[in-house]
Image: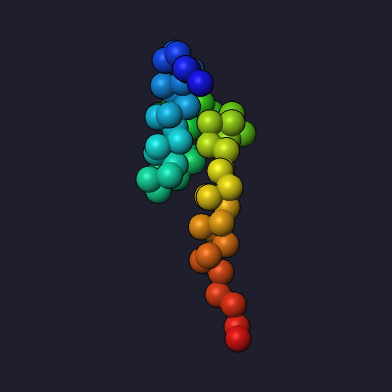
Amino acid sequence: MDEKTTAHVLRHTFATSLVRGGTDLVTVAELLGHSRLETVRIYTQPTEDDKIRALDHLIVAE
């Protein structure tokens, strides 16, 4: 798919890169100019790989 580079694509990439790099959502929201975390959430939807990696952090008693 040939996706055009738009302001929305750049904004989404910026927010997603920050979150995946460990920046908390409050800081990302401020950098994007949002006052509500719910608004930022649309830019940071987890991938299936993100969910798997998160579950890998669980400690399972044997």
The answer to whether residue 30 of the structure is visible from this angle is no
Residue at 60% across, 83% down: 61
Count the marks: how many?
0
Q: Is residue 19 left or right of residue 47?
A: left
Residue at 48% across, 32% down: 29
User: Coloring scheme of the render?
Assistant: rainbow
Q: Nearer the viewer, residue 4 or 12?
A: 4
Q: Is residue 31 left or right of residue 46?
A: left
Residue at 53% across, 31% down: 43
- The quadrant of the picture occupied by the C terminus is bottom right
Residue 38's image quarter? top right
The answer to whether residue 13 of the structure is visible from this angle is yes
Q: Position of residue 53 (x, y in %)?
A: 51, 57
Q: Is residue 26 left or right of residue 48?
A: left
Q: Is residue 23 left or right of residue 56?
A: left
Residue at 40% across, 37% down: 17
Relative to 39, residue 4 above or below = above
Q: Position of residue 45 (x, y in %)?
A: 57, 38
Q: Nearer the viewer, residue 11 or 29?
A: 11
Q: Position of residue 4 (x, y in %)?
A: 45, 13
Relative to 33, residue 22 above or below = below
Relative to 61, residue 13 above or below = above
